[in-house]
Image: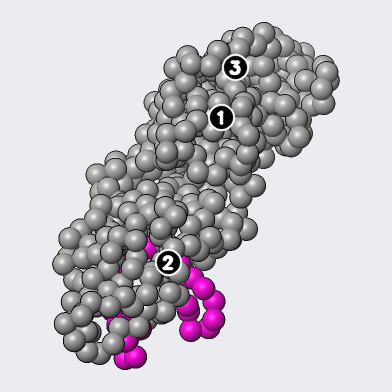
Amino acid sequence: MSDSIAIGVSGMKAMQQVVETLSANVANVNTPSYKRVEPQMKTIGFSSWLPAEGDENTAALNTSVSSGVRFTAPRRAMTEGQLKKTDRALDLAIRGNGFFPLNRPDGVVVYTRNGDFRADAEGFLVDANGYRLASDIQIPTDAKNIRIASDGRVYSTINDKEEELGQIELASFGAPEQLAYENGGIYRPTDASGEAEISPIADGKGGTIAQGYIETSNVKIVDEFVSLVVAQRAYEANAKMVQAMDEMSSLANGLLKG
Amino acid sequence: MDLYISLSSSLSRDMEQMNSVALNIANAATPGFKRWIQPQTDVTQTHQNTTWGERDLSAGKLIVTDSMLDVYLPEGVYLAAQHTGQDVFVRGGQLRVNTDGQLVNENNSRIQVDGATGPLNGVALISADGRLINQNGETLGHLKLAKSSQAQLIDNGVYRLENIQDIPNGVAVIESGAYEGSNVQITDEMVSILKTMRHLESAQHILKHEDALNERLFSALAKF
């Protein structure tokens, strides 16, 4: 009997984590380039035993017992958010599935899709966290009219003459949805995502750059609210299950009282 | 004393039936979960071991996503796959290309692809007839589809099929951009809870009455 209670509790816990995940999505609806997280659940403990070829003994299959549900590593939906026009010269959005590689001060290369760049004290392009763009684009102090082409080439007008300052490279991954996410819109490669392939935009990998735009979050608030309602109802159903099992146990225990 | 044995067996079976309801409710939002069907209670079979019921293999709810590699298959249609080195079948799901360029699902079952000449990195879309298409519109391979009405669930999301019928290339059966949710209906499960509770209550009442009758019988006998 305690099995049913444990199963119900596992359902309640999983649903609680679903609500937490969905709340994080709702909270980040206005965070540039935020990618929504899809809660994922798995049944616990179905037999991992598979009968060998030609094995007729299937009795064990019927007795496979599972003991509820668990919340597993959520999946990040890497679909592109809409591009919002800002007209800021250093706001860059990626059209495609690439990432901007950044040099973190500790020497590790990390990745972001948030193209809210600015020039630091030395004129290097840095992201919102202050990490320098790995392509090391330095903007001279007397530069005017910064123009960034869709292939990532950065031009500026110095003494009324347009000069090329360098080219922004983009990184692409075999399985971007498997990247590890850190605060501040930063991604790190994992074994599952594969190593970054950093290349100039000309070869078509990673997408192209749109100057004067910011990628918005891909969270759709209505979808999140619908999912929240469903999760809440599922939580209640699990709670009712626990309550019902408690009542049944109490009836069974009451047999002896006469 | 047969009635005692029958009723106590019925009581414990009711409690165990609640396990399958609990599992169904807990997995009401688990992708691809197939509900446990309530085992039939037969109080005359007192010595039968409790067995789990069958699984209801009907198709689950269609859940729309933004990923064009998520696939939803109609009932009875499966994808050929490999799981822990064995040839099995799966019901679509959330597919992705792993770093080795192989197509896998959320349980890391490797999906079999016909006609693939190299790694599948770059697959952007799965067409309704199972073609894997990259961003330039080129076909990189076909999903291997199979149809069967005799399936057995042998692990989470993993099936073994009998009487397999192949689905020829070009037949549109796949809904991409969606995956299969659980086939549990919470309302049905709530009704099952009520039914099981009432069943247990009635068995408990009979047991109590039987006990009271026996007590009267024994006390009457004791007077002789």
Tell me where residue B111 appears, x and y as whole percent.
62, 32
Residues in magenta?
A102-126
Residue at the extreme front: A161
Q: CA distance from mark 2 to mark 3?
A: 44 Å
Relative side of B10 to B33, left or right: right
Q: Which residue type carries mark 3?
A: Ala
* Chain letter behind tag 3: B
Tell me what residue is drawn at x 55 percent, y 26 percent: B142
Write the residue at 45% across / 75% down.
Answer: A134
Q: Which is nearer the eye, B17 or B173?
A: B173
Position of A190 compared to B193: left or right?
right
Residue A244 position, x and y percent, is 48, 35
Q: Image quadrant of residue A117?
A: bottom left
CA distance separating discs 2 and 1: 31 Å
Tell me, yes or no, whether the highlighted magenta stretch contains residue B62: no
Q: Earlier in the sequence, mark 1 or mark 3?
A: 1
Secondary structure mostly taken by the magenta-highlighted segment of the chain: loop
Say which mark, if any, is on residue B146: 3
Q: For mark 1, what is the residue?
A: B141
Q: CA distance from mark 1 to mark 3?
A: 16 Å
At 72% across and 26% down in the image, what residue appears?
B87
Is A123 contained in the magenta span? yes
Q: Which chain is mark 1 on?
A: B
**Residue A139 seen in the figure:** yes
Residue beneath the point at 27% across and 47% down: A220
